Amino acid sequence: MRLECQPETEQQYLDELDKVWATPPAAIDTSLFRALAGAAGETYPGAVFTPALFEAGTSLAPWRERGIPGYGVYPYVLDNDQLITMHGNNERIYVEALRRGTAFMYRMFSRFLA
């Protein structure tokens, strides 16, 4: 990250960060979003599907520069215990979460086969 100037206040620093990193949210009227939402509805009936802020969002810049949207979606449902261990020394998720997440991904990708 490179700031254009050396900010003097916290607000100036935050404003500079916004200039470097802030981007508008991805559009939700895309075939990718419809595929994600449809697969989520099949895999997790009754759940409300919505994009979210995603902590890995800064990794999306090369994709978004090419017009590929990114959404804060995990293919599986996690509880707090799994979130804590997700990137720890003993990283893991429950087998059932992995099974349903795999089903979600297959359903999502199958929506692009025609």
Image (cartoon, rainbow, N blue to C red):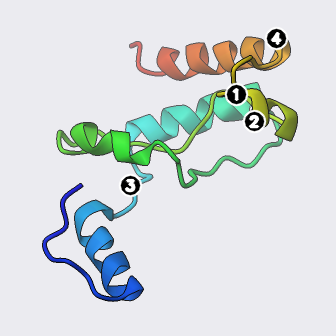
Residue 86, disc: 1
Observer-nearest residue: 30 or 4? 4
Q: Position of residue 49 (x, y in %)?
A: 67, 46
Mark earlier in primary sequence (3, 2): 3
Q: For the residues marked 2 and 1, what is the alpha-carbon distance in whole angstroms?
A: 5 Å
Looking at the image, residue 45 lies above or below residue 64: above
Name which residue lies at 50% across and 14% down: 110
Left or right of 80 on screen, residue 86: left
- Mark 2 and mark 1 in contact? Answer it, CB < 8 Å: yes
SS of the residue under disc 3: loop
Question: In the rendered image, which quarter is residue 91 located in?
Answer: top right
- Mark 4 or 2 closer to N-term? 2
Q: Secondary structure at mark 1?
A: loop
Q: Residue at x 86, y 34 (%)?
A: 81
The image shows residue 50, relative to residue 113, as above or below, that is: below
Q: Is residue 42 visible?
A: yes
Q: Which residue is mark 4?
A: 95
Q: Quadrant of the rendered structure where residue 7 is? A: bottom left
Q: Quadrant of the C terminus?
A: top left
Query: Which residue is farthest left?
Result: 4
> At label 2, which amino acid type do we have?
Leu
Please give the residue where the numbered disc 2 appears in the rendered image. 83
Q: Nearer the viewer, mark 1 or mark 4?
A: 1
- What residue is shown with label 3? 27
Tell which tag, 3 or 2, sits nearer the viewer: 2
